[in-house]
Image (cartoon, coloured by chain):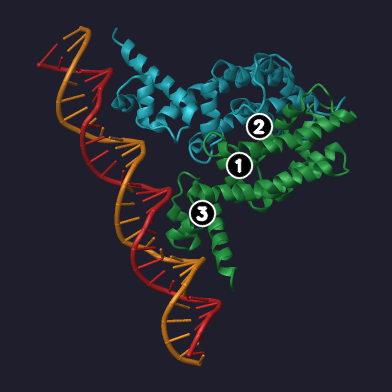
Chain colours: A green, B cyan, C red, D orange
DNA sequence: GCTGGTTGACTGACCAGTCAATCGATCACT
DNA sequence: AGTGATCGATTGACTGGTCAGTCAACCAGC
């Protein structure tokens, strides 16, 4: 019982923040909203985090490092290059399926807000693009991908397509049943690898 | 000289707002920043616009309606379906080349901020996706595009890829010379239509 | 002297972050 | 077991600063 309470309350605050940020957006949430949602006193938020931003920081970094690890693991695997891209797309889609609110916060408040808040995290975000580009470049080396498309360019298109799909789910512009998620995983890769035109 | 001054100052304010929003982001700019940049008194901003948001509103709506018109014109043209997509990609890329600051504001503060401010404009944004989807659907009808990819899905991927490229330019993650812009136009379409894998 | 553009000082609300006070678990020493 | 000292966790009232939006006055052309 020595360390249990501290960890508990900290997590409680982080999880409350996910819900509140997802509901109202970062700018529109007051620190008191987070505290209320967590069932905790206002000041306690500042006991664990030095500012409102640091709460969002923490949420982003925790999850993004998982994404980076997943991409790099896919890259190191023995699978085909196409399967590697499928693994990446699958990881992102599953992240959304598993915790839509957290992914909403990360995408809306960080990844797609590179101007304000996301600026701090540009290097980490960029690392994801670079790792994907590495997969594409390897594919070009082996001849499984065409060489006339710059890997960075391909990587941005690929990631952009996925993120746009998540945005579509987040804002309910496209259907989001479980089967939609599963289809999406293979369809993004099919679109990017095979193209829209019939072979 | 009856109507010249009013139009003048209004535009002056709008153009100043583009620069300031692009530089600092919407939330970080004070109305006084806009007024200063425009060389105009604070109160005048409120003479022409009912709030800070309405300034951004106006900037977005002006440009987005051009985009919608461009997409719909492409759709109505006699070109091949692929050429239609090229026209859309070209229009967006050229918009960025012509006025990067305005496009930065629109993308960062509206299109990719669907949570906070962009929420108001979701219907207009959606109209763009729908129009692109219509082009894809027509292509499927004619057999120039494969039928196993949902048009809405394809449209989101296509638009997402383009927007990600713009983001890359905006945040200087990818090179942005004039030739890069030109190549991008055809390469996005090549990626989406032909795919990454060699034919 | 009227009308509509223009000015900028002012106010009211809001909220991030501070801090002094309280609580309660653990431990040292009887 | 009992006492009380210690220290981190927890509380929430309060403050300081910021700004969006208002408004009464001013000005220029007709």
**A126 and B87: which one is in front?**
A126
Per the image, label 3 sits on a secondary structure element best described as: loop
Per the image, label 1 sits on a secondary structure element best described as: helix
State the residue position of label 1.
A107
Label 3 marks a residue whose chain is: A
Name which quarter of the figure residue A187 lies in: top right
Per the image, label 2 sits on a secondary structure element best described as: helix
Q: Tell me how far mark 3 sits from mark 1, CA to CA.
A: 21 Å
State the residue position of label 2.
B160
Q: Residues within 10 Å of mark 1 (few under 14, many from 20)?
A: many
Q: Residues within 10 Å of mark 2 (few under 14, many from 20)?
A: many
**A143 and A131: which one is in front?**
A131
Label 1 marks a residue whose chain is: A
Name the front one of labels 1 and 2: 1
Label 2 marks a residue whose chain is: B
Picture residue at 74% right of the left edge, 17% below the top: B80
Q: Residues within 10 Å of mark 3 (few under 14, many from 20)?
A: some
């Amino acid at each position: 019982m020595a360390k249990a309470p501290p960890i508990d309350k900290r997590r409680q605050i982080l999880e409350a923040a996910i819900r509140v940020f997802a509901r109202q957006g970062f700018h529109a949430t007051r620190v008191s909203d987070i505290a209320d949602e967590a069932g905790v006193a206002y000041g306690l938020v500042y006991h664990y985090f030095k500012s409102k931003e640091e709460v969002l920081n923490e949420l982003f970094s925790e999850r993004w490092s998982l994404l980076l690890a997943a991409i790099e693991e896919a890259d190191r695997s023995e699978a085909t290059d196409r399967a590697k891209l499928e693994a990446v797309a699958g990881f992102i889609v599953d992240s959304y399926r598993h915790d839509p609110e957290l992914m909403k916060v990360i995408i809306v408040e960080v990844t797609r807000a590179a101007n304000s808040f996301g600026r701090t995290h540009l290097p980490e975000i960029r690392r994801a693009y670079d790792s994907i580009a590495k997969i594409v470049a390897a594919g070009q080396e082996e001849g499984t991908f065409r060489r006339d498309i710059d890997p960075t360019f391909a990587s941005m298109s690929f990631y952009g397509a996925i993120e746009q799909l998540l945005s579509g789910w987040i804002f309910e512009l496209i259907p989001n049943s479980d089967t939609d998620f599963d289809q999406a995983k293979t369809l993004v890769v099919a679109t990017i690898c095979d193209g829209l035109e019939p072979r």
